[in-house]
Amino acid sequence: MAGQTQAAQQIQHQVQMVGQAQAEQQIQHQAQMVAQVQAEQQTQHQAQTADQVQVEQQTQHQAQMVAQAQADQQIQHQAQMVAQVQAEQQTQHQAQMAGQAQAEQQTQLLLVTVKPLPFQVKMVSQVQMMMLL
């Protein structure tokens, strides 16, 4: 048991170092911490069920794969967030453009409706004047 515990501690340390190096290359500090914790949890369970030699050989490779998968997932999530923010900005920009277009249309509409009014008023006033005369 003591030998197994020692092996688990060594594996954890190796996993931390591997996970940390991969996370540093690929993403920010948060991804490091997530990859490190997940890798630690997986290797502890594997150390309990597998024998010492196999664990030492396999966990390094598995830790790299876990850290890489986690980093990939976080990068995708960050990319999604960036895409979402960009989409929101574009939607806002489109909404602004649509609002502007509507405002321009309304302005034109107002101009169209306002322009004939003085002429109509003149015509009415001339008719009234003719009727008065």
Image: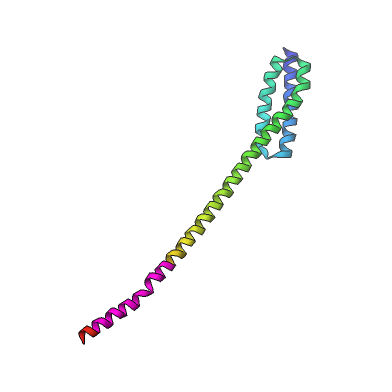
Dividing the picture into quadrants, the one containing residue 76 is top right
Which quadrant would the C terminus be assigned to in this image? bottom left
**Is residue 41 in the magenta section?**
no
Q: Residue at x 70, y 19 (%)?
A: 46
Magenta span main SS? helix
Q: Is residue 83 left or right of residue 60?
A: left
Q: Residue at x 68, y 30 (%)?
A: 36
Say if residue 112 shows up in the picture: yes
Which quadrant would the N terminus be assigned to in this image? top right
Q: Is residue 105 above or below residue 62?
A: below
Residue 115 pos. (x, y %): 38, 74
Q: How is the image coloured?
A: rainbow
Dividing the picture into quadrants, the one containing residue 16 is top right
Residue 10 pos. (x, y %): 75, 22
Most extreme residue toward the left, as rendered? 132
Q: Is residue 27 above or below residue 14?
A: below
Most extreme residue toward the bottom, as rendered? 133
Q: Is residue 114 left or right of residue 38?
A: left
Instruction: From the viewer's side, name the closer residue of 89 and 8.
Output: 89
Q: Residue at x 75, y 19 (%)?
A: 55
Residue 129 pos. (x, y %): 24, 84
Q: Which residues are magenta?
A: 108-129
Total marks placed: 0
Instruction: From the viewer's side, name the closer residue of 55 and 96.
Output: 96
Say if residue 13 shows up in the picture: no
Q: Is residue 6 above or below residue 125?
A: above
**Is residue 118 in the magenta section?**
yes
Residue 23 pos. (x, y %): 71, 36
Q: Is residue 52 left or right of residue 42?
A: right
Q: Is residue 49 above or below residue 18?
A: above
